[in-house]
Image (cartoon, coloured by chain):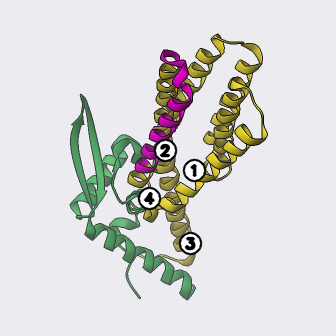
Amino acid sequence: MAAPDDVIHQPVRLRVMAALSADGEGLDFTQLKKLTGATDGNLGAHLDHLARAGYVEVTKAFVGRRPRTTVKATKEGRAAFARHVAFLKEIIAEGG
Amino acid sequence: MTVDKAQAGADLAAIDNMVARVKQSRIYRVSGNLAVLWGVLQFVQWGVASASPANAPWSWLVVDAVGVAVTLWMLRRALPARLGGAGVKRQLAAFALFYGFGFVWSVLLGHFGDRETTVFWHTLFLFGYCLAGLWFGVGFLVIGLSLSALVIAVYLLVGPPLFWLLIAVVTGFGYILCGLWMRRA
């Protein structure tokens, strides 16, 4: 049986990776905050964790005068998320 | 780290829920942009028709054709099929059905006057919003019902020439404000 991904398993990071995998083109920080229900600091910490693992790419830029942080899942992150989902499905199929 | 069946089920449900919310958020964003586009087009159409009343029917056709083309382009760009968007053929079919139905009633069967025709097309368009609300979220339903009510109120309470200006204001500002609201929702 495949192993769970320690980085993705945490609830907020799981939701972040699910959102980024569903969108495909990347989401900005505000959208992610709204979707996950996390606070600024909490989400920032989890994004740092995911970025250190190489699962997401965080880009900061200015749109007009406003700073904008965009987060996108990397190829490695997508693969890790797909493996974690397969692991969860495997548990369900085998009856835990 | 151990994960039991209940935890795995809960995680998969959380993932499904997040995927659905992301798709809905994307639909709201692109729909908001489209509503702003059509709001601006209402003012353009009103401006052209006011400046040159003789060309009003043609300006309506040209503005709508531009609106449909830009709408298809924006949908294709922001909501490709892999993210749950309908294909171009289905979008074209939707517009063909919409304009076909509207043409049959407003030109062939309805015998409407200018004001009735205007109100008919606006409420037909907004009826589409109401139906979309049943699938894509209550925001569409709110916009469809509230703008329809305003358009009908203008028809019942205001006569020409103020009628045309108020219809442009209600639909133009209405779509723009609703679009901005949807983009934030």
Chain label for disc 1: B
Q: CA distance from mark 1 to mark 3?
A: 41 Å
Residue type, mark 4 in image: Arg
Parent chain of label 3: B
N-terminal of the pair, mark 1 or mark 2, is 2
Q: Are marks 3 and 4 on the same chain?
A: no
Position of residue B107 in the picture relative to residue B24 (left or right): right
Q: Are marks 1 and 2 on the same chain?
A: yes
How would you rate the neighbour count of disc 3 (Cα within 10 Å): few for under 14, some for 14-19, many for 20 or more? Answer: some
Q: Which residue is mark 3?
A: B9
Q: Which mark is residue B133?
A: none
Mark 1 burial class by Cα count in 10 Å: few <14, some 14-19, many 20+? few
SS at badge 3: helix
Dividing the picture into quarters, in which one does residue A4 lie? bottom left
Q: Position of residue B29 (x, y in %)?
A: 46, 43
Q: Does label 2 or label 3 sit earlier along the sequence? A: 3
Question: Which is in the foreground here, disc 4 or disc 2?
Answer: 2
Q: Which residue is mark 1?
A: B95
Contact, mark 2 vs mark 3 (Cβ under 8 Å): no
Q: Which chain is yellow?
A: B
**Chain in green colour:** A
The amino acid type found where label 1 is placed reads Phe
Residue that carries the numbered disc 4 in the rendered image: A15
Quadrant housing the N terminus of chain B: bottom left
Asked whether, in this view, residue A48 is left or right of residue A32, the answer is: left
Q: Is residue B91 visible?
A: yes
- Residue at the disc numbered 2: B68
Relative height, residue A63 to residue B69 (above, below): above
Label 4 secondary element: helix
CA gap, disc 4 and disc 1:
36 Å
